[in-house]
Amino acid sequence: MSTLTAKRSGRRPRRSILPWLATPALLLFTGFAVVPLVGVFALSFTTWDGIGSIRVTGLTSWRAVLTDPGLPHALWVTFLVMAVSWAVQTPLSILLGTFLAGRQRYRAVLGVVYFIPLMLSSAAIAIAYEALLDPNFGLGAGLGVEALSKDWLGRPGLAFGVVIFVVSWQFVPFHSLIYQGGVQQIPKSLYEAAQLDGAGRVRQFFS
């Protein structure tokens, strides 16, 4: 309709500026996600000790990884961490996302504070927790609490739990943000109708 009116009046139709608004985000994503990924893939065909010159060695690195006898165990542990962390993150994310979808002001402040881990890189989080969990110089030793001065990353059972905790701590905010957006899209009339039918908060949550 607007295009037809513009043609009749002799004016050029106004183009949407929405694609141009997405350009900065696209450039940032390309610069900080796509380009490093391509660079890592290219480096996989080389040999480099981090100091000297980079030498192109073809499939040498790939062959060494695929023939490593520890590869099946590493893949199994990776998938196990994915499955267990998903089982931990999903219920926590649903509960937290539903809670943060409330209208109280303090919930918005809590949401901003809680989403801080989402803005940190995985490398920074790994280094920070490695230092905090160090049995000799970490948080437990600094506070003088013997219960926290365990070899958290040196014992298989404890290390697995620590990895699950750290991964969940970082990514629960992301999934909570998704569930929060979904809950906020539910019309208030549905909650009002549920209250009239005598449904409590628990019943409203599951229904």
Image: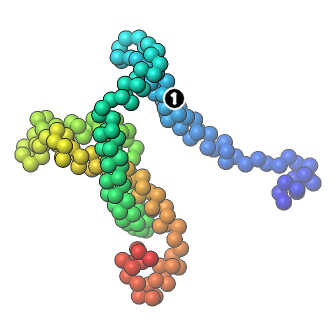
Residue 106 percent location from the top left of the image: 36, 63
State the image quarter where residue 74 is shown: top left
Is residue 123 visible in the rendered image? The answer is yes
**What color scheme is it?**
rainbow
The number of numbered badges drawn on the structure is: 1
Picture residue at 23% right of the left edge, 37% below the top: 130
Is residue 37 rendered to the left or right of residue 121? Answer: right
Which of 202/5 is in front? 202
Residue 195 percent location from the top left of the image: 44, 84
129 up-or-down from 115: above or below: above
Picture residue at 40% right of the left edge, 66% below the top: 98
Residue at numbered disc 1: 38
Is residue 143 visible in the rendered image? The answer is no
199 up-or-down from 16: above or below: below
Which of 104/77 is in front? 77
Which of 50/143 is in front? 50
State the image quarter where residue 109 is shown: bottom left
Q: In which quarter of the image is the C terminus?
A: bottom left
Is residue 159 rendered to the left or right of residue 119? Answer: left
Picture residue at 44% right of the left edge, 24% below the top: 44
Identify the residue at the far top of this view: 53
Which of 11/181 is in front? 181
What kind of residue is marked 1?
A: Val
Residue 146 percent location from the top left of the image: 6, 46
Mark 1 closeness class: few <14, some 14–19, many ≥20 residues within 10 Å: few
Q: In which quarter of the image is the N terminus?
A: bottom right
Residue 24 percent location from the top left of the image: 58, 38
Picture residue at 51% right of the left edge, 79% below the top: 190
